[in-house]
């Protein structure tokens, strides 16, 4: 099958396209995400096959993200996408780049506010899935276009705070587990689940009133401080490391824009009695945490416009990923700016921040060119769609951030297990891990 896709080499785009898979029809509908919010789902049909995708949504939506809905709601977006049917039917489902150009042209804005980012997301992914089904290949293979697939490792949210967990929980949004030393995806997934379980026991030992409440991404939402959360996670990780025999490391998503007060130019930690940190103090705070807890991964340690500060932090760490989520919002132009400044060494990839699948592919090409590690990520409001697993492999991500438990989180991880099994059956070996790249 690999050879048949050569016609899609972007450098040879002008050459004869031998194998277009025209979209015959699509059906869009309003469905719900894990938070019970409305979302757009699209089903695309091509000759002999179909594909389906529904868009996730974030709790804290960055200023520069694609706008999810036309006119602010799902039903108006639905009417809108349906009104462009004659322009969309007939396009080549197997080419995410040309679909993106068509969607952008129809939309005519810089942020998909006319067609709705959720519609662009669902339509482009459903169409790519339909094409891969028609070709009888996995979606990731269509996206890789002949390149060797690699299996990303799971980065799992274990303790939640900030906007995901609410009052009393830590100021930092996510405390994550990363099974860095695993030799297989299955063991990596299992290790994160064990850490998640052990953390609950530790939290309960420390606070008998802890009832097992969870935040939007399935992470525990305890009444504790940053330090309390880090101590509990460290203890759990060292217990599980002893059991599994490989390295597991801590990650943080600080989502610092939600701590940032632009008027005062300080980061406010309400859980620490309203303590404020200046930019320099914030950088030092992050460096101290990395040192003390041997943290491997820090996402958005500084606010969404702090490129120079993120550059400074990046130069002061050694062997730790400094990752932009709200900072880059999966936007190629913003990443170009970050590359020039040297801000960060890892990039979150959320297709719905970018809009269409083709936008996210452009972003991943740029990130890889400049050696930023890619972390393909779910959103806090997500659906049971599993295609994030394919998008992670198809964009060359080294990590997949999709929680540890909860149906909509585990759906992506279970898909990775199926993909690995498929690799074993078809090639006699597991898919090599992306960390070995
Ligand atoms: P969001 O959070 O989906 O609510 O934006 C996830 C994250 O910040 O990584
Ligand atoms: Zn984030």
Image: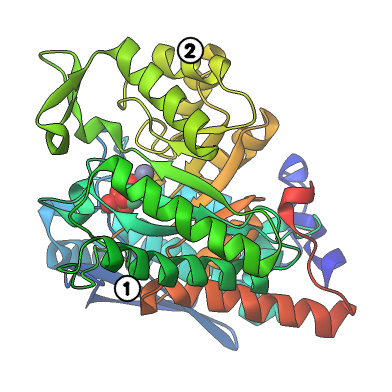
- Label 1 neighbour load within 10 Å: few <14, some 14-19, many 20+: many
Position of 170 relative to 369 (above/below): below
Position of 121 relative to 269 (above/below): below
CB of residue at label 1: within 8 Å of ligand 1? no
Which element carries disc 2, helix, strand or loop?
helix
Q: Position of residue 55 (x, y in %)?
A: 34, 64
In the image, 339: left or right of 406? right
Q: Position of residue 277 (x, y in %)?
A: 23, 18
Q: Nearer the viewer, residue 337 or 264?
A: 264
Q: Quadrant of ligand 2?
A: top left
In the image, 294: left or right of 14? left
Q: Nearer the viewer, residue 316 or 223?
A: 223
Could one spot residue 378 in this view of the protein?
A: no
Q: Position of residue 236 (x, y in %)?
A: 47, 60
Give how far apart the Cα atoms at labels 2 and 1 are: 41 Å
Which element carries disc 1, helix, strand or loop?
strand
Question: Residue drawn 66% across and 74% down?
Answer: 186
Position of 257 relative to 310 (above/below): below
Q: How many numbered circles are shown? A: 2
Question: Residue drawn 34% across and 72% down?
Answer: 383
Could one spot residue 178 in this view of the protein?
A: yes
Residue corresponding to mark 1: 41
Question: Residue drawn 40% across and 73% down?
Answer: 405
- Label 2 neighbour load within 10 Å: few <14, some 14-19, many 20+: some
Q: Position of residue 344 (x, y in %)?
A: 52, 26
Q: Nearer the viewer, residue 294 or 372?
A: 294
Q: Earlier in the sequence, mark 2 or mark 1?
A: 1
Residue corresponding to mark 2: 312
């Amino acid at each position: 099958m690999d050879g048949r896709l050569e016609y899609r080499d972007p450098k040879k785009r002008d050459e004869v396209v031998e194998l277009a898979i025209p979209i015959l029809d699509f059906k869009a509908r309003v469905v719900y995400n894990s938070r019970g919010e409305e979302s757009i789902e699209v089903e695309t049909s091509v000759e002999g096959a179909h594909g389906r995708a529904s868009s996730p949504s974030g709790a804290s939506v960055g200023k520069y993200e694609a706008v999810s809905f036309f006119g602010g709601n799902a039903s108006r977006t639905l009417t809108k996408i349906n009104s462009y049917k004659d322009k969309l039917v007939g396009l080549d489902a197997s080419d995410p780049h040309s679909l993106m150009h068509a969607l952008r042209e129809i939309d005519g804005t810089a942020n998909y506010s006319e067609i709705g980012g959720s519609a662009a997301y669902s339509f482009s992914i459903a169409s790519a899935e339909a094409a891969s089904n028609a070709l009888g290949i996995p979606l990731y293979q269509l996206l890789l276009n002949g390149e060797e697939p690699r299996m990303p490792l799971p980065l799992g949210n274990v303790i939640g705070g900030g906007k995901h967990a609410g009052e009393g929980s830590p100021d930092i949004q996510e405390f994550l587990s990363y099974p860095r030393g695993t030799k297989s995806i299955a063991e990596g997934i299992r290790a994160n689940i064990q850490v998640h379980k052990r953390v609950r026991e530790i939290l309960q030992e420390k606070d008998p009133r802890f009832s097992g409440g969870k935040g939007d991404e399935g992470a525990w939402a305890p009444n504790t401080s940053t330090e309390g959360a880090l101590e509990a996670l460290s203890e759990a990780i060292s217990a599980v490391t002893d059991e599994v025999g490989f390295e597991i490391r801590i990650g943080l998503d600080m989502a610092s824009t939600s701590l940032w007060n632009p008027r005062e130019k300080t980061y406010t930690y309400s859980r620490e009695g309203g303590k404020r940190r200046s930019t320099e103090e914030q950088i030092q705070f992050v460096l101290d945490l990395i040192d003390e807890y041997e943290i491997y991964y820090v996402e958005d340690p500084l606010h969404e416009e702090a490129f120079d500060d993120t550059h400074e932090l990046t130069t002061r760490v050694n062997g730790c990923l400094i990752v932009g989520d709200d900072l880059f919002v999966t936007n190629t132009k913003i990443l170009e700016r970050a590359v020039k400044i040297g801000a960060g060494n890892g990039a979150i990839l959320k297709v719905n921040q970018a809009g269409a699948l083709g936008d996210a592919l452009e972003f991943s090409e740029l990130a890889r060119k400049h050696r930023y590690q890619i972390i393909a990520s779910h959103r806090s409001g997500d659906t049971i769609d599993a295609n994030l697993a394919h998008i992670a492999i198809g964009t060359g991500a080294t990590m997949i951030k999709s929680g540890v438990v909860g149906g909509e989180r585990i759906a992506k991880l279970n898909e990775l297990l199926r993909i690995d099994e498929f690799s074993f059956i078809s090639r006699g070996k597991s898919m090599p891990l992306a960390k070995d790249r």
